[in-house]
Image (cartoon, grey):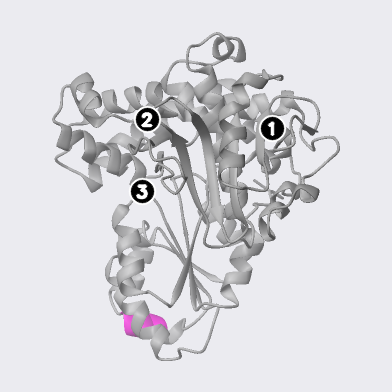
Amino acid sequence: MTGLIRNIGQKVIKLLDYFPAVAIIGARQAGKTTIAQNLLPDWQYIDLENSHDYDRVSYDPNFFFKQYPNHVIFDEAQEYPELFRILRGVIDSDRKQKGRFILTGSSSPELINHISETLAGRIATIELGTLKANEIYRQPLSKFYQLFLQTLAKDKIVAGKPPISNEQMQTVWLKGGYPEPVLSKDDYFYAEWMDNYHQNYLNRDIGKLFPKLNKIAYRRFLTMLCQLSSTIINKSELSRAIEVSEKTAREYLTIAEGTFLWRSLPSYEKSITKSVIKMPKGYIRDSGLMHYLLGIHELEQLYSHPIVGHSFEAFVIEELLQGLKATQATSWDAYYYRTKNQAEIDLIIEGPFGVLPVEIKYGSTVKRNNLRALQRFVIDNKLAFGILINQSEKVEWLTDEIAQLPVGWL
């Protein structure tokens, strides 16, 4: 991944100016170690999955931190839970000093608990997803995201030709964004890597964190999640489909979300409409992994598959949210919206900038009738505008309230 620039890089450096420590979290093999070492090549690197490095820190922590009181990268920090308590004391001994430690961690719901309970106020947390399209094609983060750094206004909508073509976006949509297999551009290696990643996820990560887990049932659950991606999740129906209890199905969802495979979107309940459905919606976060688990290996297979529309929706939402996380925008949340009368909006982003409803369509054109829910939501809630993201060729105002953006702008 030589020369690969990640979108969150500048934000990590900025956060180090404000906090003693920064945690970079995310799925395994998303590139957390690489970004930490590339950003801070002169810092001491400690791999806590390496027995030598683990012993070096854990045998005599006081001696270690006397040697290295600053500028240390702790990789896979969840492997040494006691580290969080020790770091608290080290940081508090010189509370005003910033930019001292980087922690990375993956596949551990406990990691977030350790950070929030032990290092609250001392550490900033940032999530690294798999590669976004602009990172794969070595493009800067789209100026589309400047929209969220100010109050939403129509005249701030981007214009001109998208920086990434529809054809390029389709390739990323099919293959996903795990750096090593995607950047290799070798189809055989890609398939082998995905298979090994899936097996390692089940046998190593999940097996270690949840040793009593029924791996066969959880494997069926993952396949079912792929089929249900971008839909409202009924846990009762899901549990019956994979022949486990509803409690177990809830636990499986928590595991999938905590290990960064699944993103859950809560229902948006702040609209003036009272008849909203309140069950969560969710999707598999990396489109390439989802397609691989469903046996979809070519674009032609994807185009004719029943999940094509839902798959494109999930891909677009994740691209958008990962881009937004790389900006300086803060305190925002993502939702979906659906009423009992079937009016639906795929994504609603709410933050200091306002509320932006987003509809996502797989095709390049859309009938006005299909925009009624979006248009009505904008008008009823007195919003600046809404956007439609699809595979069109240009930015265009479809109505007074709705702007069409090609997916390449993300």
**Closer to the eye: label 2 or 1:** 2
Neighbour class for label 1 at 10 Å: few (<14), some, many (≥20)? many
Q: Is residue 103 magenta?
A: no
Q: Quadrant of the N terminus?
A: top right
Q: Secondary structure at mark 1?
A: helix
Q: Position of residue 32 (x, y in %)?
A: 51, 53
Inspect the image, locate mark 3, and give the three-letter code of the amino acid beneath it: Ser
Instruction: Identify the image quadrant of residue 220.
Output: top left
What is the number of the mark on residue 107? 3
Q: Position of residue 171 (x, y in %)?
A: 65, 25
Mark 1 vs mark 3, CA separation in Å: 30 Å
Closer to the chain start, of discs 3 and 2, is 3
Mark 2 vs mark 1, CA separation in Å: 24 Å
Give whichever of 10, 45 is nearer the camera: 10
What is the number of the mark on residue 232? 2
Any part of residue 142 in sight: no
Give whichever of 341, 199 is nearer the camera: 341
Inspect the image, locate mark 1, and give the three-letter code of the amino acid beneath it: Val
